[in-house]
Amino acid sequence: MQKAPEFKTQRTEIAGVSVARLAREFGGTPLFVYDAESIKRRVADLTALDAFDVVRYAQKACSNIAILKLIRACGAAVDAVSAAEIRRALAAGFDPKEIAYTADVFDADALELVVGDAFGCVVNCGSPDMIAQLGAALGERAQGFKLTIRVNPGFGHGHSAKTNTGGDLSKHGVWFEQIGDCVATAARFGMTINGLHLHIGSGSDFEHLAQVAGAAERFASEIGDTVESVSCGGGLPIPYRSGEEYVDLNEYAALWAKTKETLEAKFGRKIELEIEPGRYLVAESGYLVAQIRAVKKQAENVFYLVDAGFTHLARPTLYGSYHPISVAFADESATTGAEEDAIVGGPLCESGDVFTQEEGGFVVKRRLPKANVGDFLILEVAGAYGAAMSSNYNSKFLAPEVLVENGEPRLIRRKQTFEHLIANEIF
């Protein structure tokens, strides 16, 4: 299997563009920067696999419309988990037939969209109530309507308990023992279930994926010969540390190809197989550029305090997630062999606003080039669940976003201003 390249702790550029130039041209820091070529490569990884008929991007990982347009141009379809994500996909040029709406509930806006402006999109129901609500909303149009269901197979897996999306403590999906009830409810409205979706968590391993593939065969058989498609979900891991291995895509594809062949033999027709990556397509493309605003010594500990916080990248605080960290000196000609162990924290009024921590909130040190106030610190592999999970806690502004394509950076999200921040407040 291919190993990740070594993550360097010092850099001068991102996708061929100087870090200092990026900060200077796009309003300073914090700043998200995406490498378009990285995204193109990862989409191509999956579209090249014969086993999968559809590569569907789970846009919750990074839903900027420019990113969606890029992924659409690469030939992928898209998944949406909210009404606004459906609207983002439409704005990016996706046809409703290229959009799948996956959720455990219908809010009023989403239900109105899937029976209205986005009619024709795949509706992937994660609870029995959704099926009944969809049938009622469609009325006469329910006759012959095809929907899919996301099934909770009774087990799950993930890199954190918070990313485990299967099992009896997970809110996600139709409990596997209720599949027959769902088929009956759909039939009552004249609808059929023509697809099955399974996703047990992010960062799954092959042992668990083999379990999912076996479950897919059983559940498709229970639904019956109306099944036309199977989605194996996402959760493909990517390396965050030097030396970690990429997932073996050929082994992954072979696993699901066998399931596809079994079902095609059983039903006597072609079964469309989907894969639904989010993180895999965008994580490595993204960098959060911050500036060191203070270097503090607390007893024996050195802190690099930067102007980005968990309002910009929440994963370390939420899950104890590890991100590679590098330093770019403000003086681009500067080099140093000096290093020190440092704790990297942000500006927020929370002790948990630390980027170098493990799950459970345990603060750790990172060996980094010795840096000073004004130097840049880059949190790498931040394209997934970075900007998408940003917030305005402490009234911090959302960071601008820049896409670098063919060596040219362009703004794809403006820097938030105070006027934007308070625009919807009434006083």
Image: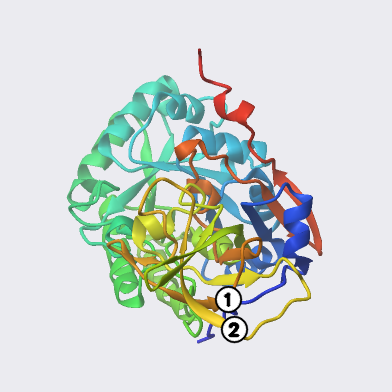
Say few, some or many: other residues with alpha carbon within 10 Å of mark 1 (under 14 / 14 to 19 / 20 or more).
some
CB-based contact (under 8 Å), mark 1 and mark 2: yes
Identify the residue position indicated by label 2 in the image.
338
Residue name at image x 50 percent, y 35 percent: 395
Residue name at image x 65 percent, y 64 percent: 375
Q: Quadrant of residue 55?
A: bottom right
Q: Is residue 387 above or below residue 247?
A: above
Which of the marked residues, 1 or 2, is nearer the chain's N terminus? 2
Secondary element type, mark 1? loop
Q: Is residue 324 above or below residue 349?
A: below
**Nearest to the observer: residue 427 or residue 99:** 427
- Residue type at mark 1 is Lys
Identify the residue position indicated by label 1 in the image.
370
Secondary element type, mark 2? loop
Residue name at image x 40 percent, y 20 percent: 139
x, y percent for residue 156: 26, 62
- Residue type at mark 2 is Ala
Instruction: Report whether residue 299 is seen.
Output: yes
Say few, some or many: other residues with alpha carbon within 10 Å of mark 2 (under 14 / 14 to 19 / 20 or more).
few
Residue name at image x 26 percent, y 40 percent: 182
**Nearest to the observer: residue 397 or residue 3:** 397
x, y percent for residue 124: 40, 43
